[in-house]
Image: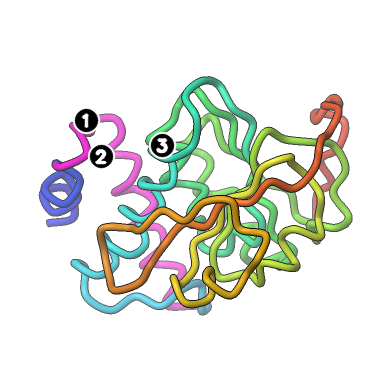
Amino acid sequence: MFRDQVISEWARFGRLSDEQVSALERHYELLKQWNERMNLTRMTSIEETIRFHYCESMFMGTVLPYGALSIADIGSGAGFPGIPLAIIRPECTVVLIESNQRKSVFLRESCRFVPNASVICSRAEDVSGSYDWVVSRAVGVEDVLRARLAPRTAVHMSGSDAARLPQVDRVIPMPWGDQRVIAMFQTFHVEHTNMEQTKPTC
């Protein structure tokens, strides 16, 4: 059921490969199992889960620039938007930053079938190194921007919240749900460092 519905829902944006659909489905099945033991994310119907978790996260990947980017997902939680973004953009490297140790264990399990994704168990403000982009959802914008990990930031949020932020550079409406947008921010100029030396573990 998941496979057919995610293919159908994403069809307006392009074709998912068999490998991408399988990776998305494995994450979904793992998420269902873990969600029974701990509250990773709100899951209602499979249709809403696909639209508002998976497709919105993949849509984030379509609005970021082309090319091999380094991306940090702050407060990744259940892996959104980072896991689906990494699946739809295999040329990019995606680091999932999550301070909760149990959620980080779940994310590491999820990364076993997403080779371009990895996990840092830490608060974002304690992470060193730099990235091309920071992405996030369900985390306060000021907290995301305060981390200063990338020169550009993209955040899932409501359109009304985005309209109240003077520093927003661009607002991109999402196809699912009323007033759901991706807000883009320019943060600062960074000099890239060797990120392999800046990955604390729990």
Amino acid type of the residue that numbered disc 3 sits on in the rendered structure:
Ile
Up/down of 96 relative to 160, above or below:
above
The N terminus appears in which quarter of the rendering? bottom left
Where is residue 4? Give x, y as percent: 11, 49
Q: Residues within 10 Å of mark 3 (few under 14, many from 20)?
A: many
The residue identified by callout 1 is 18
Amino acid type of the residue that numbered disc 1 sits on in the rendered structure:
Asp
The secondary structure type at the circle numbered 1 is helix
Number of the label disc, if any, that sits on residue 21:
2
Main SS of residues in magenta: helix
- Residue at left 73%, top 68%? 142
Amino acid type of the residue that numbered disc 2 sits on in the rendered structure:
Val
- Residue at left 58%, top 64%? 77
Q: Earlier in the sequence, mark 2 or mark 3?
A: 2
The image quadrant of residue 176 is bottom left
| Residue range (magenta) | 12-37
Up/down of 83 relative to 67, above or below:
below
The residue identified by callout 3 is 87
Up/down of 180 relative to 145, above or below:
below
